[in-house]
Image (cartoon, rainbow, N blue to C red):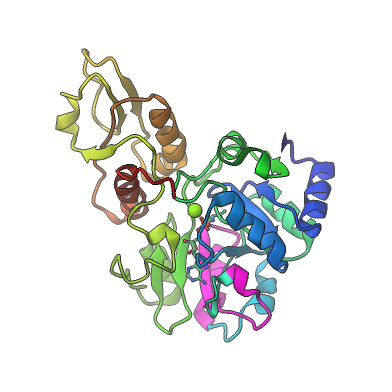
Amino acid sequence: MIVTPDADHIARAAALLRAGELVALPTETVYGLGADAGNPAAVAKIFAAKNRPADHPLIVHLADAEALTQWAREIPKEAIALARAFWPGPLTLILKKEEDVPPEVTGGQDTVGLRVPDHPVALALLRAFGGGVAAPSANRFGRISPTTARHVFDELGESVALVLDGGACQVGIESTILDLSRGEPVILRPGMIGVDAIAAVIGRRPRMPQRQEDAPRVSGALAAHYAPSTPMKMVDALALLSAPAEAAVLAREAMRPRHFTGRWINAPQDAAGFAHDLYANLRALDAAAAGSILVESLPEDGDWDALRDRLGRAVVGSGEQDET
Ligand code: TXA
Ligand code: MG
């Protein structure tokens, strides 16, 4: 059920979390499918609802940075500096986990992913609940992340007791994931908080790993992810001039050719705007039931890193028939 996030519904959502039920919540990045991170049986429901492999760890959402010490140990100074600079916000820190963090949350690893989301509804729920909320994106495994309450309902339907409607997510793609558990900072998933912004705070540039290196640990790092079910490809602006009529197009700078009769979406030209609309646009293009989705290639500069990453994985994933 989709509900407005008034005080009563926040209280009800917190009670559901305490009772071990799932609640979908808005964050500034994408909607999350939340469960009490301290309750393994509740966490197990997330994996069942998403059809997600059990060894893929979940991010624990916290009401504030002070809660860090309940979840992580040996917290490096860089983590504190980054939490100060970017929380609440779209940055997830991977740290060594406190002993009693359930292995169901961490995929059996000795690290835990933590972030404080920058959304008033998420923060209100976290405060009312009082604990950590484990929440992956509220989509079926491998599919496009939801950025509206309606997307969540379309993806997961009745398997979620309650969907808090916080409007369209402001950032639109998932948080940057930075691993600080192994001495050297490593980006596990690029996001709208980029390498330069992180380097400006900690005084050194995090490493971008080889694609394969962390693949089993971060589902967002699987080559195929964030995928529409229509075959998708990246093409340059020129190629869009002769886009076939049965295609669905996500253009940035290219203008719609006069003869073109298929679905054509002009995305915002700046990276932040492009990210904000990206998943809703992919859903709309997928729903057009076209023969293919053609996406205009993206600029090479750092602002677009996370977007090239997501679209690259969506292209690979769109070629897969397997829904997981
Ligand atoms: O923006 C976001 O991060 C959203 C919102 C809801 O907060 N959440 C999200 O969750 O994208 P999910 O589960 O779809 O992606 C989280 C990624 C997964 O790829 C998971 O493998 C990785 O975080 N992750 C979580 N804990 C980890 C850990 N201890 N070590 C390595 N990767 C971890
Ligand atoms: Mg996800």
Residue 115 in the image, given as x and y percentages of width and height:
58, 64
Please report the residue visible at 50 percent of the width from the left and 78 percent of the height from the top: 78
x, y percent for residue 84 = 58, 69
At a point 78% along the width and 49% down the height, the residue shown is: 13
- In percent of width and height, residue 142 lies at 44, 50
Q: Quadrant of the N terminus?
A: top right
Residue lying at 44% horizontally and 34% vertically, measured from the top left: 283
Q: Is residue 207 left or right of residue 21?
A: left
Q: Let me know if residue 29 is in the magenta part.
A: no
Question: Residue 120: x and y, percent?
Answer: 68, 49
Given residues 133 and 276, the one toward you in this image is 133
Is 89 covered by the magenta stretch? yes
Foreground of the two, 34 or 128: 34
Q: Which residues are magenta?
A: 77-105
Q: Is residue 48 visible?
A: yes
Quarter holding residue 39: bottom right
Q: Relative to residue 67, is residue 48 drawn left or right?
A: left
Q: Answer with left or right where residue 298 lies relative to residue 132.
A: left
